[in-house]
Image: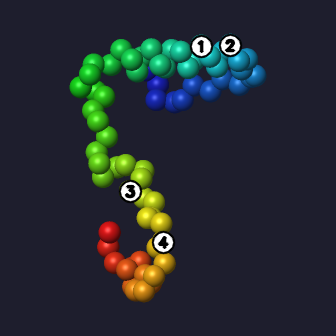
Amino acid sequence: MSDDPIVIRGRATSADVAAIIAAIASLRASLPGEARRPRSLWARPSRQTRPPLSPGPGAWRASALPR
């Protein structure tokens, strides 16, 4: 097989897109349970957000401290 990507040009209808999504979803569902391992706690998107700022004495200093 060639490593070149297959490029198809044209206008996909909503039925075409739905068929592709259904095929990908069925392939994903057929994977064994071990292939779907839980996400690491380090990879949680919520870790990338900062906590809300709380006003008060020393708040500016506490904002730079590690969580």
Whichever of callouts 2 and 3 sits on the residue coming sooner in the sequence is 2
Q: Label 3 belongs to which residue?
A: 47
Residue at the farthest left position:
34
Answer with mark 2 or mark 4, whichever residue precedes in sequence. 2
**Between discs 1 and 3, the one toward the N terminus:** 1
Q: Earlier in the sequence, mark 3 or mark 4?
A: 3
The type of residue carrying mark 3 is Arg
**Gap in angstroms between the C-alphas marked 1 and 3:** 36 Å
In which image quadrant can residue 17 be found?
top right
Name the residue nearer the viewer: 12 or 56: 56
Residue highlighted by disc 2: 15
Determine contact: label 3, label 4, CB under 8 Å.
no
Q: Disc 4 to disc 1, how far (Cα)?
A: 47 Å
Identify the element where label 3 is drawn.
Answer: helix
The residue furthest front is: 56
Tag 2: Cα neighbours inside 10 Å, few (<14), some, or many (≥20)?
few
Give 42 or 9, whichever is nearer the viewer. 42
**Label 4: element kind:** loop
In which quadrant of the rendered image does the N terminus lie?
top left
Q: Which residue is mark 4?
A: 53
Task: Tell me the mark number nearer the camera, choosing from 2 and 4.
Answer: 4
Q: Measuring 57% from the left and 25% from the top, which residue is drawn there?
A: 6
Please name the amino acid that badge 2 sits on: Ala
The relative height of residue 65 versus residue 48 in the rendered view (above or below) is below
Q: Nearer the viewer, mark 3 or mark 4?
A: 4
Which secondary structure, mark 1?
A: helix
